[in-house]
Image: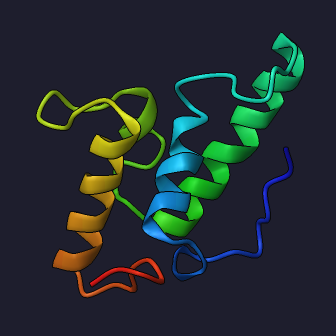
Amino acid sequence: MLIDNEKTISDYTESEFIDLLSNFFENKHGLNASDFGKFIDNLQLHVVKVTQHPLGNGLIFNTPDEIECSPLGIFKEIKKWRTSHGLELFKDSK
């Protein structure tokens, strides 16, 4: 699976971004260990770049106890943080 590094957060719908985050929790594309590791490395760089969340990849790999460690939990934290800072949201956010 290729990651489009030109995308910004507003290029994703909420469900697309949750689906993107779900890749951290399962090998949905059946990649071998080496390729999966490379994919996750690239994916985390992309997510950190588009979300601008201060926890960076720690939000994914070292999720704080007060945040649900799941694609939806991480998504909710990103949306909450971006909203509180007046930053652009997902293309279908209300």
Residue shown at 23% from the left, 66% from the top = 81
Q: Of residues 44 and 17, which is closer to you in this image?
A: 17
With 32 as the anchor, is 62 left or right in this view? Answer: left
Residue at image location 70% in from the left, 28% down from the top: 28
Q: Position of residue 15 (x, y in %)?
A: 47, 59
Seen in the picture, residue 38 relative to 16 is either above or below; the reply is above
Task: Check the image and report above or below for 16 versus 25.
Answer: below
Residue 63, quarter of picture: top left
Residue 30 percent across, percent down from the top left: 81, 20
Residue extending farthest top? 33
Residue 72 lies, in percent from the top left, at 33, 44
The image quadrant that residue 61 belongs to is top left
Q: Residue at x 34, y 57 (%)?
A: 54
Q: Position of residue 12 (x, y in %)?
A: 56, 72
Q: Residue at x 40, y 40 (%)?
A: 71
The quadrant of the picture occupied by the C terminus is bottom left
Whether residue 70 sits left or right of residue 2 in the image: it is: left
In what quadrant of the picture does the N terminus appear?
top right
Give the color scheme: rainbow, by chain, secondary structure or one colour: rainbow
Residue furthest left in the image: 66
